[in-house]
Image (cartoon, rainbow, N blue to C red):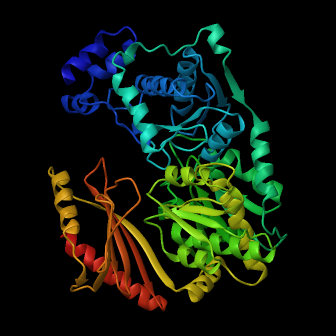
Amino acid sequence: MTKLTIEQWMNSDKVSQEYKNQINMMTPEQLEEAFHKNVEFGTAGMRGLMGLGTNRINEFTIARAALAFAQFVNSRNFNKRVAIAYDNRNNSKKFAEISANVLATQNIEVFIYDKVMATPLLSYAVRELNCGGGINITASHNPKEYNGFKVYNEAGCQLITSLANQVVENVNQIEDYLNIETQANPEQANLIKHIDNTLIDKYRNEVLAQQLDYVKNAEFSLVYSPQHGAGINVIPALLDQAGYNYSLVESQSNIDGDFSNTLSPNPEDTDAYIEGIKLAKENNADIVVTTDPDADRLGVAVRHDGEFRLLNGNETTAIILNYIFEKRVKSNSLPKTPFVANTIVTSDLGDKIANKYNATMHKTLTGFKYLGTLIDEADNLDNFIFAYEESYGSLPLPLVRDKDAVSATLFLAEIAAHAKLEGKTLIDVLEEVYAEFGYHVDQQESITVAGLDGAEKVAAIMNKFYSETLGQNDFGNIIKIENYDTQESITSNAVNHLDFEKATVFKVFFEELGWIAVRPSGTEPKIKVYYAAIGESQELAENHFKILSDYIKYKID
């Protein structure tokens, strides 16, 4: 199979001589890795290493994905119109233009941003321009060697599984992908239009109009880093318009697909904050905000007692959620039947906050496509309060149907500015939340299972969890088990159905300690573990986290 595929590439007149020379220079191992299968197009789109071969992101695999999506759009009863955005990564603009041309050859009207753009603005464009779908060329926070192809529906939401599977089926049926037409003729090219600043300005003005309680605080300042990514084209202008004092990490503010001046573009990594904290110390700034390359996720570091402390996704979103409720009550704008949404692996702290305000907390599987779909299907968006997940993604305003680090940055600045006026930091604000609702230690880790038989080991470890039973063990008293693969919630009183599509997620709830959740990676020999420890004090919550961590080590070792 690999040899035959390589021969097809070498014999094709669509593969340039330069590319053929590169293929000839590959080692047998490199050839096997690059050509032994097709790069996976899954329910979250396509993401992988860039390079030559069927198992890589390149102009041919992008063209195949674009054609498959075009077929999907043309098969549905929505406008034959697609919005396209792209991030700062190497080849992102090229891949976006290839996608636009492929769509145009299929008589689909295309609206493409004329510069690197944040993910929420792709969702916004789909909605505002009445598109039948959207394409986002991005690999989010992955290393520079990666790129990807994400697809959206007519609501500006990433495709849920049932719809994504239709695109996957189309991809799998395209065999002659080397000969896909990637250059629209002059008539077809007229279908390709560019999105300019007009739409961006409209989005920014809508966000500004929904500030809850803007306060001018000349003493407050922040540092912002876009990590060489798309945030630079939206967030500074938003902060300027709102009137905040801020400094840019200039070394990380140029568009750069090599991420030259950051050790990591991922807000979940401490390395992403090194330059920002350095500048904040020089400027005496109160917080450091950073967004990932496509500006859908946000991270923050807070000056507290002379040092900077990083908040994780659960902590940041708990602060935002509590603030929204407080301000909506104060302004008498809280709806009678408010709702909040998060995922099954997100901290329960938000559930407690929502309960105080008689709000319904909706849960979804991991992935913002589920949250976006839930919001889009809501009976009355006037009741919407906030949607978020533990992996640093949130949506403060229902203007879009994907994670929005742009509007979240503005909300966080507002909260921090108010705190500064009261002589507090965001750490103090979080402590007040804990004091009222109970202390939480919410963490996550990815555990890599070494060895050539890694996948088998992962399966064996998951089987250990699947065989878990209720009752007392050496770590505590298990009072509930949720198995999302069998769609069962098990307690001593009953076995209830979990109303979610099947997912390889397993949760174990301990009396007094909190819960853990585990889910295996679908592509690597890894297991992701989520910890949600609780306690009446910080010390007790940390002790409970240690017990939960020991339980995981026992299961995995």
- Residue that appears at 50% across and 85% down: 439
Q: Position of residue 194 (x, y in %)?
A: 70, 27
**Total labels drawn:** 0
Where is residue 74? Give x, y as percent: 54, 23
Q: Quadrant of the C terminus?
A: bottom left
Q: Where is 421 relative to 398, above or below? A: below
Give the residue at x 53% y 40%. 257
Q: Is residue 534 above or below residue 333?
A: below
Where is residue 185 shown, x and y percent of the image? 59, 8
- Name the residue rendered at 38%, 16% in the picture: 178
Q: Is residue 141 left or right of residue 195?
A: left
The quarter of the picture where residue 491 lies is bottom left
Q: Quadrant of residue 110?
A: top right
Horizontally, residue 170 falls left or right of residue 38, namely right
Q: x, y percentage for residue 299?
A: 57, 62
Point 34% across, 54% down: residue: 502
The N terminus, quarter of image = top left
Answer yes or no: is residue 50 visible.
Answer: no
Indicate the quadrant where residue 33 lies.
Answer: top left
In the image, taking residue 447 as reference, residue 391 lies left or right, namely: right
Q: Nearer the viewer, residue 531 or 304?
A: 531
| Residue 24 visible somewhere in the drawing | yes
| In this view, 133 is above or below 484 | above
Pick the residue in front: 2 or 248: 2
Viewer-proximal residue among 470 and 66:
470
